[in-house]
Image: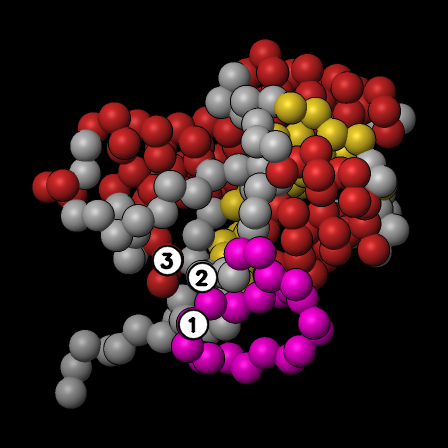
Amino acid sequence: MQTNILITGVGHGIGSSLAYYLNKQGFHLFLASRGDTVESVAEKIGCHSWKADLNNYKECEKAVEVATEAMGSLDGVVNVAGNYFSTTEIEKYPEDTFQEALLNNARTFYNMARASVPVMKKQGFGAIIGFAAADNVLLNSNPGYAAGKGAVYSMIRELSRELIPYNITVNGIAPGFIEKDFIDQGVPQKLGTPGRYPPSGVNRAVEFLLLSELITGQIINVAGGHNMNIGSGIK
């Protein structure tokens, strides 16, 4: 079981929900993010945290170092950092916003994976999980967000093959539209329900991947079927 997990990108959304969930399942956690939320979440669940700008590789290296020292090993890394979703059309989408969206999604995953791999190679195992986006989100977003999430998707596929000899799995989650600041009540959800879904399905999918040592190179859609709900285009 991959028990010592570093979660990066812990804000008001999936990151904090995932931390609460994995803590309840008995995982030993370390949280890292650049905002203030990471400290309050860590205090509530009783784990260590670290302030880090995940766009800065040196700060990611330090976060991995401190997390590994605090937990004794680095069994898994889950990078939730990203966002910059909007429905802004390309003519109204500034170049600087494109760059921010691209880098905040793609570079944060790259930095955390790059910083984690040496530790995992040395210990002989590990799990890396990144966050892409389901098609119903991706195709209704903007150029920068789509480019960033697309890059994460491609890196997961490339890294999974590259790291097979080192017993390191690399997988991804592609969420649909997920509620933020949501307290999961464990209410069953139906496929195709309009609106945002609670983060519980995402949390369980991440747990599954952390515990699945023979699954690598996979991106699991957690979107309630909306990623598949596309018309045929013929009458």
Give me the residue at 62% from left, 38% from top: 37
Q: Residue 230 is drawn in which quadrant?
A: bottom left
Q: Earlier in the sequence, mark 1 or mark 2?
A: 2
What is the x, y in percent for residue 199?
60, 61
State which region is magenta. Answer: 180-201
Residue tagged 3: 137
Q: Residue 117 is drawn in which quadrant?
A: top right
Do the CB atoms of the residues marked 3 and 2 lie less than 8 Å apart? yes
Rate crowding at label 2 as few (under 14), some (14 to 19) or many (20 or more) other CA atoms within 10 Å: many
In the image, 144: left or right of 187? left
What is the x, y in percent for residue 66?
77, 19
Task: Please tell me whether residue 186 belongs to the stretch shown in magenta.
Answer: yes
Towards the viewer: 1 or 202:
202
- The amino acid type of the residue labelled 1 equals Gly
Q: Earlier in the sequence, mark 3 or mark 2?
A: 3
Towards the viewer: 60 or 180:
180
Towards the viewer: 196 or 147:
196
* Residue 5 shows up from this direction: no
Which SS class for mark 2?
loop
Give me the residue at 54% from left, 25% from top: 54
Indicate whether 101 appears above or below 44: above
Q: Residue 40 is drawn in which quadrant?
A: top right
Q: Earlier in the sequence, mark 1 or mark 3?
A: 3
* Magenta span dominant secondary structure: loop
Indicate whether 87 appears above or below 43: below
Which SS class for mark 1?
loop
What is the x, y in percent for residue 134?
43, 58
Residue tagged 1: 195
Residue tagged 2: 177
Rate crowding at label 3 as few (under 14), some (14 to 19) or many (20 or more) other CA atoms within 10 Å: many
